[in-house]
Structure formats: structure tokens, C-alpha cells
Image (cartoon, coloured by chain):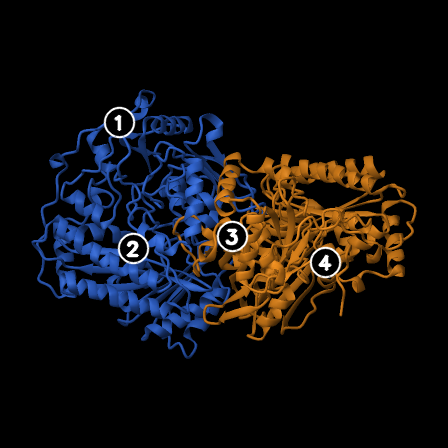
Chain colours: A blue, B orange
């Protein structure tokens, strides 16, 4: 059985081995123009020293609580660059005092009630894949302890409504877990964030995760029919906020939308009804190489505004395409795909390619197009290379970190009109910060999702901090780059996050983006649903 | 210049004349099986007696306030059946004490601040087309008076971003007003609620209005990029909640979604950025007659779950088709349409028709299909009959009322699995109530919008109260039918409204639909944004 790494992304067994990391080192250091790095020895769990618990789980929770060292370590951090840096350095100072593993909703509610009474901060925990400080125990003063509430035992598809194409799913179900249960009914959710292997439905709901579809159903929000949240506002049924199963409603502000994105600050999702669908049978895809990035952007905008609704519409700039092995020409590449369970999608792909390859966009002849009728994997070479690299990327980040290199991503959304300014500002800010801290570095861009009124740009940056830099210096270098990037996003009209969430990391910039009156409204909601203010303190709100 | 009727829907000149009303009377009374009714004399405005204002507009508001009798009368009610009944009977008891006509946002804010200080209830007023008691001055005790705040002077398209396909529009712009301004840029919003001629952007935002598109972009919510709301929470800029222009974001709960549907209870929308589009060039449409309603429902469900996204997908049951002159066979009829500014939509229509006419759905040969490339009106006969009847329906309701007949509509949404039970329960409840109060009556159904997980059913009912019934009896009869219908909706898993809003009429059933904790959350938001509780009291919240 595979073992979750206590410091790196994913399973220990999936991390590139020493030879693989050495190869990565020489490839990347060549790109960065720095001397090759020697892999550092990987940390061993036996060297981890956890702080002693400050408080024990309140008595009624004893049956489903643990202070096992490996559990406490796995619940100390998410998987951001800094999280991994600290864990790599064996720093587990913010470990939770205990971990709760409730077996049903009643135990979730008991956990909230008891911790509220005892003044213990409560950190809901799904897959632990937050990259924004969403699950860490650094909650500030005022708490007698910190509990991590792991939903992994609530992992079932409880009910399927095949007529309405909806399924009631527990919040602790992971991507593969819920998909395999839905597959037994011939159905699928088709929500594939990069964290798919580990992240959970509850985490997707709490963070408004972005998924597979590049258009239309981009966030999990779009697939939600109703939600169920347990709050520490009361005991018994009065503590549960269950919204009605409806395809749509116009009755007052949408209740689900106030809870989606609440990041554990209001309560804990225990289950939800999701819109599911038949498994796709028809797929058509192609990729188009460009020689000019601005032309590629114009082409993608035209597709996004044409009402064709591709499932894949990912533009990679030249650097991103190089990084993912997706370019034939060394230039930008656009990956286009359509899918349907019901009918051929040759027509819309053909139409999209006609738009993309028309003058004045300067697209070359498309590779592909391929039209397939089956469930088989595949697609043209560029799309397949990209798909494999997509899911491997988090492992690569960990491997680079073990080489002493800094690699991270950040993302946003903005209008098409704002994009050129935002793009230029972000590149300048990140390049400047990398130059100042690492003597240079790498930055690349792709669009993960596109809308009629704008794209969701996603940036990757890599730098080589001084080889002898200590933990504090490495964290400070990252903060410098991150601050420069985040300032540029907010000042250029972007959002601090399209789908990575706010957490503790993005909160200062979220506060600049968010209307002050809306912050007041959220704070009022929090006081109502979480009167003792124990729920994930410091996330979203001060 | 056309004159808005002080009691009926729309313009006085558009109401059917005496001959027209007499013809309607004999047609409907034949359907209902009652003796023909004589048109009652129409009320004259000169007979209206308005209550004296209890309070004058606070001094700083004098420049843009009026106590003109016609203005006060026009701002007394919306256009529900009971609103029209009361106005027809010259009962204007809940007239506002004064009407405010601000010329800019600063005057809107001044109005809110002054009325909050003076303890005057504030009723935001757009087109005055509410059918749920959303704009009336019956606000309960605790206020020194009632002001109606009419946004009609804020009616401009302020800015167009053609690259991002978005426009900044003031909240007082009516449907035709904003469309004509957008047309100058070759753009359109394509949001056509039945009230389109009179209702305003601000009203659409406040009530989450349903529009033209039967799938995908069904509510105005789906077209909103950002909103701007003025609240009475502060003076100056601190009173304004402006959300950021973004195509999408995952930063916390969606701020727009908390304000959309707030029905004037939190503040007043002054403007918004809306997603607009190129005018459609390609249209394909067809209609299909059915002999069996359940088969028709199954066919529509299959289309809704196929990912084809028709712009029109309206199923009329046999009675509804008869009422609208849309059926050739005397049975149910499905109106299907696709549109695009960019490409032919023959393909998706052909595919939808293949689904609909396949066994075992028993659809007959479709009428049409017609494929047109131009901006011209038209379509097959059924669709055109239906479109004309759609916009004429509110006038017909007023004409029937003048004949002493009761006609009204209500609507909902539910899952496909729940629909058969809801349909049966609603029919039984409404038929029973009509039988008990009117000795019988008429009920019909259509789907206004459809989703992968369920339809939005829309019911019309007509009854003939006793000819000598007085106002109180007529209102009581309507309440009996409405109560029966609303109980059936809520008890069968529906929503109290898909797009007519909650207002004061639907609030008791909304409270049964809404999770109690969500009600607490909304109340907390209201205390924050409207601390003096002057905004549209009694709407949404007690």
C-alpha cells in the first residue's frame, strides 16, 4: 500500500527517485542558467520532533481522536511550497494537538460542539492539498488548542438519482473514490482538479475548486445541486444547514453560493447533491501551434466568445509548452477538445479550428484533429503530453524542492481587455523579484479556463535560491516573489485566485480585492454560524 | 405618448378595447363552462382617493421628490392579480407618502441616509412589475412613513467594453432602453422576461429575473460580471458595495450572489457590468406535437441532458398550447430553437429533433425545421404564436380581471424525478381550490426553462368567481387558490419561485423552503447593510 509522504506531494513511491531528480536538476538548471544542484538527502520521518499536545481531545471525542505522530504530522500542513519547505526541514511547530476522524455526521457535530465549548480551534481537513495555508494550525492566540477534523471516513456515494442525473455524496470522498462509486452506475462527475487523486468533495466545495471543463462548468459550484453543512451554532438538528435539492431557484439570494468558498470558516460540509452525467463517448481534439502569443490570445478569445463550449481550451505560452513537452514549433500551443456522451463533436471542433486558423490569427495547420468514439484515452500527442505533465507537476515541484530549487504556481482571472496589462505587469514583477532574490529565473503562463469575458491565466515560476540558503531565507525569497506577483494581480484588475482559494496566504490581497462592506457581511454571517469563532480561524477573515 | 395604466398591466392604449374584452369573455367563459360575463366599467383615475401623506420628504430630498397623485398611485402596487384588483376597486390605501426620483447615485445615497435618519421605510422601485408584493408600501408598524425610490432617471449604458463583451449599465434602464443603447454598438444582452417592456436592470438583479434562454443563461445572475449597490449602512463611499469586474473568481463566497435576489432588503443597485454578446445571425427552430404529455416530458428531459443548449426549449401542455394557439393537434407541443451569432445551428437542432422524435417518445414529425441566417423575426407558426401570446399575456390578465374573471400564474423548479408527483399534487390542489371557490376552472402548464436535473414548470389558472363577489371575497378566493398551489409546491419538493421572486406574497412559503440557519445568516447580513431596517421591510425577511 502506498504511503502518503509527510513532506512532499502525494505518495512517497511516486516521487522521482535519485536518478530522476538528478536528471530533473540538470534539465532545470540548464534552463535557469545556474550550476547543477546536488540532490539533498530526503528527510526521514523518524527525525521529526512534534510539539507535545497542549490539550487532549474532550472526553466525548476520545473514540474517534488520535495523537498518533504520523497523523499529526500529516495534518500539520497543506502542500504549498512553504509547507513542503518547512516539513522538509523537519519543522512541525504548528502541528494540531489531536486529529479527529469522525465516522458519521453526529460525530462531526459532537466535535464542533465540544471544541466550541472548550475553546479549541477546529481545522476541517479533506485531502490536505491546500496550497494557500488553508489547513494549518497557525491560528493566532485565543485558543486552548487546535484540532484537525479529517472527513476521510465519510467517503460514500449515498444515493443516486439516475432520472435527474444527480448523486448524494459524502464530503470526505476523494476524486478517485467518488468516481469509482459513480462508475458502477454508468455516471461520472468529471471534476478533475490537479489535486484529484487526493482532494475531496468537501475540500472542493469549501474552496470552489476548478475542474476539468475549460468552459461552462469550470468550478465545482456549477455542478452543485444542494449542500449540507454542520455548524457549531447549535446542538442537534438546528446546527445543520441543508439546502433544498433544486435544479435552479429564484427565491432570495442563492443559499449554496454563500457556503461555497467559505473555506471551513462557517462550518463543515458533510455531504452534497452533485449533478453527474453519462460518461463521454465522443471526443474530438486538436492542437494548434502559434508563432505569436498575442495572436494566440486573440484566437482563444474568439473561440470563447463563439458559444462553442469546448471542454478543453488550454493555451500554453512558449515556455509552458516547452516545460510540458507540448510544442512542436517552440512557440505557444493551443489544446482544443470537445466531448459528449450523446453525439459527435466533430462539428464544433471543426468550427473552432476554422476560427483559430483564420487570418489574422496566424495559426498553423492544426495537429489532429482526432475524432474518437469510445471511452479510450488518447488524443493527439500534445494533449496527451500535457495531461500527463499536468498530474505529474505537483510531484515535480517536490522533487525540485529536494534539489534546493523553488518552483511554484499562482493563478487569476481578468477581463480580456485587462489581460495584456496584467500579463505584462505580472511578468515584470516576477522577473524582477526572481532577479533580485535568485539572480534570474523562469516564468511561464497558460490559460486553465476561458470565459466569454476573460481568461483564467495560470503562472509557473522557478528560481534557484543560493545553495546555502537556510529555511528562513528560502521562505523569505518565496515571500518576496509571491508578494510581487500578488500585488501585480490585484493592481492590474485580476482576482487573487481563480481556483486555488484564499486561505491564510492570500488573505491580505483578498482583503484588497474584496469590497469592505462584503467583508462586513461575511463577518456577520460567521458570527451567526460560528459564534465562538472556532472554525478555521484566520482563513478568509481576520 | 402612451400612458401607463394606474390599475392594469402596461399602457392604457394596449389594453383590449370593449369589443376585444367581450370576445375574450365569451371565449373564456366557454372554456370555463360559465355564463358569459359583461365587461365591468373601467375605473377612472379621477375617482381615485389617495390617503394624505403622513410625512413630507426630508428637506435635502425635496429637489427630487414628488407627491403628485398619479405618481403616488403608480407607485402603490406592483402588478399581481390582487394589486390590480385593489387598484380596479380604487383602493390605494398603501400609497407611499412620497416618491423619490434621484438623478444620480449621490441622490440615491442621500435618500437612503435621510430616510434612515427619519425612520421612513424605503421601497426601491424599478418597472413596478412585481407580481409578488415586492414594491408595495404595506410595511407594518414602526415607520414614520413610506418612500418609493424610483430609479428611472438612471437609465444609461455608461460604458461598453467590446473586447471583453461587457457593458456598464445603470439600474433604472428598462429592457427596450438598454437594448436600444447596446444596439448602437452591435451588441445585445438578450434577457427578455415577460415584463421586458417595463422592467429594469435593477429589478432583474434584485429579483434574479428569468430571461430568454431556456438553458444555460436562464437567470440574469448568469449574465452579471459585477454589481454596485448603495446601502444605508454609512455615508459617502463607505456605503457603496462595488464588486470587482471578473469573468470568474474562486476568492471566497461569490459576492454578487449574496446581493442578487436581495429584493431591495439590503440596498439599492445603482449599476452593474453585464456580459453582452453579438446579435444572433443564425437561428434554427422547429416545433413538435405530442399525443402524450409524459412522453413529451421524457423527450424534453433527454434534450436537456444531451448538452445541446437550445435557446428555446418550451414544452406546452395541451391546455397551454390551446390557450396560446400553438398546437396543431390539440395535444402538447414542444418549441425548440437554437441561435448563434457565429455559426449555423442546424446541427444541434437536427440532433435535438432526432432525440425528440425517437421511439419511445412518440413525437410526431416536427413542424419546420426552419433555418434562417439574418436578424429577421419569424420562425414556424407555433413559435411565433407563442411569442406573441407570451408578451400579450399580462394584458390579457388585466382584461379578464375587468370582466370579473380571475387569471394568474405561478411557477417553480424541481428535479425530473420529483416532477410527476409535483405536477399531480399541484393540479389536484388547484383544481380542488377552484372547484370550491369558483365551481371549477382552468389550469395549464408549460416549462419555461429546463436544466439537466429538472424543469421549471409554469402554471396558469383561470376561474370565475361569483359575479357579485366584492373585493374582499375576490381576494379571499385568490388567496385560497394561491395557498393550495404554494403548499403543493413546497410539499412536493419544488421551490416557491424559479423567477417571480419572493416579495411579501411568497414569504411564508419561502420560510418553509429556506434553511433556518440560512435565514439567520441573511438577517445578520441585513443588520450589517441596513442597520436601521428601512429597506423594503417585509420582503424576504420578517
Q: Which residue is mark 4?
A: B390
Helix, strand or loop for disc 2:
helix
> Which residue is at the front of the view, B317 or B260?
B260
Which chain does tag 4 point to? B
Cα gap from disc 3 to disc 2, whole angstroms: 50 Å
Helix, strand or loop for disc 3:
loop
Q: Which residue is mark 1?
A: A66
Is residue B368 at all visible to an observer of this figure?
yes
Q: Position of residue A527 (x, y in %)?
A: 42, 37
Q: Pointers 3 and 1 in contact (CB under 8 A)?
A: no
Q: Nearer the viewer, mark 3 or mark 2?
A: 3
Q: Nearer the viewer, mark 3 or mark 1?
A: 3
Q: Which image quadrant: the N terminus of chain A?
A: top left
Q: Position of residue A516 (x, y in %)?
A: 41, 52
Mark 3, other Cα within 10 Å: few <14 / some 14–19 / many ≥20: many
Q: Is residue B319 left or right of residue A239?
A: right
Amino acid at each position: 500500500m502506498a504511503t502518503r509522504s509527510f513532506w512532499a506531494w502525494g505518495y512517497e513511491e511516486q516521487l522521482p527517485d535519485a536518478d530522476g531528480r538528478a536528471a530533473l536538476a540538470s534539465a532545470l538548471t540548464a534552463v535557469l542558467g545556474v550550476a547543477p544542484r546536488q540532490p539533498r538527502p530526503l528527510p526521514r520521518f523518524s527525525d521529526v520532533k512534534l510539539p507535545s499536545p497542549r490539550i487532549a481531545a474532550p472526553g466525548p471525542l476520545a473514540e474517534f481522536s488520535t495523537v498518533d505522530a504520523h497523523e499529526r504530522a500529516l495534518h500539520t500542513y497543506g502542500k504549498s511550497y512553504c509547507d513542503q519547505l518547512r516539513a522538509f526541514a523537519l519543522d512541525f511547530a504548528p502541528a494540531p494537538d489531536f486529529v479527529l476522524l469522525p465516522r458519521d455526521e453526529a460525530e462531526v457535530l459532537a466535535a464542533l460542539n465540544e471544541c466550541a465549548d472548550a475553546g479549541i480551534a477546529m481545522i476541517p481537513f479533506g485531502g490536505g492539498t491546500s496550497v494557500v495555508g488553508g489547513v494549518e494550525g497557525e491560528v493566532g492566540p485565543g485558543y486552548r488548542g487546535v484540532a484537525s477534523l479529517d472527513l476521510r471516513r465519510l467517503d460514500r456515494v449515498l444515493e443516486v438519482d439516475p432520472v435527474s442525473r444527480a448523486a448524494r455524496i459524502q464530503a470526505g470522498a476523494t476524486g478517485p473514490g467518488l468516481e469509482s462509486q459513480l462508475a458502477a452506475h454508468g455516471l461520472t462527475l468529471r471534476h478533475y482538479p490537479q489535486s484529484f487523486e487526493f482532494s475531496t468533495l468537501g475540500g472542493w466545495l469549501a474552496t470552489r475548486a476548478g475542474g476539468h471543463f475549460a468552459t461552462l462548468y469550470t468550478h465545482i459550484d456549477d455542478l452543485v445541486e444542494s449542500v449540507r453543512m454542520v455548524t457549531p451554532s447549535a446542538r442537534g438538528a438546528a446546527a445543520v444547514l441543508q439546502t433544498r435539492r433544486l435544479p435552479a431557484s429564484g427565491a432570495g439570494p442563492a443559499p449554496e453560493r454563500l457556503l461555497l468558498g467559505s473555506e471551513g470558516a462557517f462550518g463543515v460540509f458533510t455531504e452534497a447533491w452533485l449533478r453527474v452525467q453519462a460518461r463521454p463517448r465522443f471526443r474530438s481534439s486538436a492542437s494548434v501551434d502559434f508563432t505569436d502569443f498575442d495572436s494566440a490570445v486573440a484566437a482563444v478569445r474568439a473561440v470563447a466568445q463563439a458559444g462553442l463550449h469546448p471542454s478543453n481550451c488550454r493555451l500554453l505560452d512558449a515556455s509552458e509548452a516547452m516545460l510540458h513537452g507540448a510544442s512542436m514549433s517552440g512557440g505557444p500551443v493551443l489544446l482544443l477538445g470537445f466531448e459528449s456522451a450523446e453525439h459527435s463533436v466533430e462539428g464544433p471542433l471543426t468550427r473552432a479550428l476554422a476560427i483559430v486558423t483564420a487570418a489574422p490569427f496566424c495559426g498553423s495547420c492544426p495537429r489532429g484533429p482526432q475524432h474518437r468514439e469510445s471511452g479510450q484515452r488518447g488524443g493527439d500527442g500534445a494533449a496527451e503530453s500535457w495531461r500527463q505533465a499536468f498530474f505529474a507537476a505537483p510531484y515535480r515541484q517536490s522533487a525540485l524542492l529536494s534539489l534546493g530549487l523553488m518552483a511554484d504556481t499562482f493563478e487569476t482571472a481578468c477581463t480580456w481587455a485587462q489581460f495584456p496589462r496584467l500579463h505584462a505587469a505580472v511578468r515584470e514583477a516576477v522577473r524582477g523579484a526572481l532577479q533580485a532574490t535568485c539572480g534570474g529565473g523562469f516564468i511561464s503562463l497558460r490559460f486553465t479556463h476561458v470565459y466569454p469575458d476573460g481568461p483564467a491565466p495560470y503562472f509557473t515560476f522557478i528560481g534557484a535560491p543560493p545553495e546555502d540558503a537556510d529555511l528562513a531565507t528560502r521562505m523569505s525569497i518565496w515571500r518576496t516573489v509571491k508578494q510581487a506577483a500578488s500585488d501585480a494581480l490585484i493592481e492590474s484588475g485580476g482576482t487573487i485566485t481563480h481556483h486555488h482559494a484564499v486561505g491564510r496566504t492570500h488573505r491580505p490581497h483578498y482583503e484588497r480585492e474584496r469590497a469592505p462592506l462584503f467583508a462586513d457581511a461575511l463577518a456577520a454571517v460567521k458570527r451567526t454560524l460560528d459564534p465562538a469563532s472556532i472554525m478555521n480561524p484566520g482563513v478568509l477573515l481576520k
